[in-house]
Image: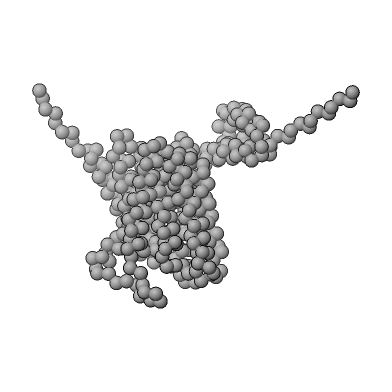
Amino acid sequence: MTPRPSPPARRPPIAARLRLLGLYPAEYRAAYGGEIGDVFAHSVQGLGNTAALREWASLAAHALRLRTRLSSSDPAGRIAAGAAPFILAGGAGLSMVHLLLGLFLPDPLEFEDWGHPAFRTTLVAVQTLPWILALICACQGRWAPTRLLVALGMLGRIGVAVAFLPHAGPAFTPYLMVLPFFLAPGTLLLIAPPDAVDLSPLGRGEIVLAALALALPMSALVVLWPQPDPGGTTAPVFPPAVQTLTHASAAWPAAVMSFAMLRHLRARRPDPLRATGIAAAVLPWTAMLAPPYYWLPPRNAHDLLRNAAIVLALLALAVLLARLRRTRPAPPQNCP
């Protein structure tokens, strides 16, 4: 009887042949290289190429965070991890407002001039839904899909800018000017070490409350904002007191984030690095996007400096209030 030929040996997945240990710093590699190699070889055994590449990417990202000093044991990594939840809250809250604008209000960017009105809705959804879905994932404690969705949202904004730049009119210029205020915080969120991001029940609650504290008042202002008559181009004229309130409303997101920093500083054991991260999440709001469309950035350097002064004043006020509470003398205890 002719013996049955043995099946060919299964080739190791592609990820097993990629460079990994060389990505780690020399000292870390010398101390833990053998252990990392054994763990990786065991974890990819029997996996397909996609799953093995996912395991490789996770370890490679850890190696790069160590090399760039952005791990959870480095101050810069802890600052980024403190900023990430509130960057997510700000991006998701603003995306809720922009989604409301895209679905129900007139088009400020003249997207409707490029075809069917549904085209505008699609463009808005591509840029806003990833951030909202990322918030939902973070509420479930799933940071990996959160980061992926944020990356997709950033790519959506870049894609819209690239696609429309050669054909855009003057109304599209503010969108391009405000684009860095979306991309820079998103990048900080993506490089934050996942194991240092606070996804405890309390931390997730803070993310949701911050996002809603941004979105609800801004959405109410969007809905209540008087719209011009069909074919009209005149902007609404408000009394001086109301006009002052509308200007002040642009600082609302910075005020919300500064209050979040104050709450952290007033905790029993505040983490100064995490508080610094929350402050970093406040800084992009120097853009102070003007209502009701929340697309218009500062018109010039003078406005930007004024906004930066307001944001820094809010942060300083939060630090001062926290310090005053900590230095307040304890009430005397009654002697028996």
Q: Residue at 11% across / 27% down in the picture?
A: 334
Q: Position of residue 160 (x, y in %)?
A: 53, 61
Q: Is residue 45 left or right of residue 162?
A: right
Q: Residue at the right extreme?
A: 1
Q: Is residue 262 left or right of residue 146?
A: left
Is residue 23 in view? no
Q: Position of residue 161 (x, y in %)?
A: 52, 62
What's the colour scheme? one colour
Q: Residue at 65% across / 34% down in the picture?
A: 47
Q: Position of residue 324 (x, y in %)?
A: 23, 42
Q: Position of residue 198 (x, y in %)?
A: 41, 38
Residues 36 and 127: in front is 127
Q: Residue at 36% across / 64% down in the picture?
A: 292
Q: Is residue 80 left or right of residue 37?
A: left
Q: How many numbered circles are shown?
A: 0
Residues 256 and 131: in front is 131
Tell me which corner region of the image, top left, top right, bottom left or bottom right, holds residue 139: top left
Q: Residue at 30% across / 47% down in the picture?
A: 259
Q: Is residue 52 left or right of residue 89?
A: right
Tell me which corner region of the image, top left, top right, bottom left or bottom right, holds residue 260: top left
Is residue 8 in view? yes
Q: Quadrant of the C terminus?
A: top left
Vertical placement of residue 296 versus 73, above or below: below
Q: Quadrant of the N terminus?
A: top right
Tell me which corner region of the image, top left, top right, bottom left or bottom right, holds residue 310: bottom left
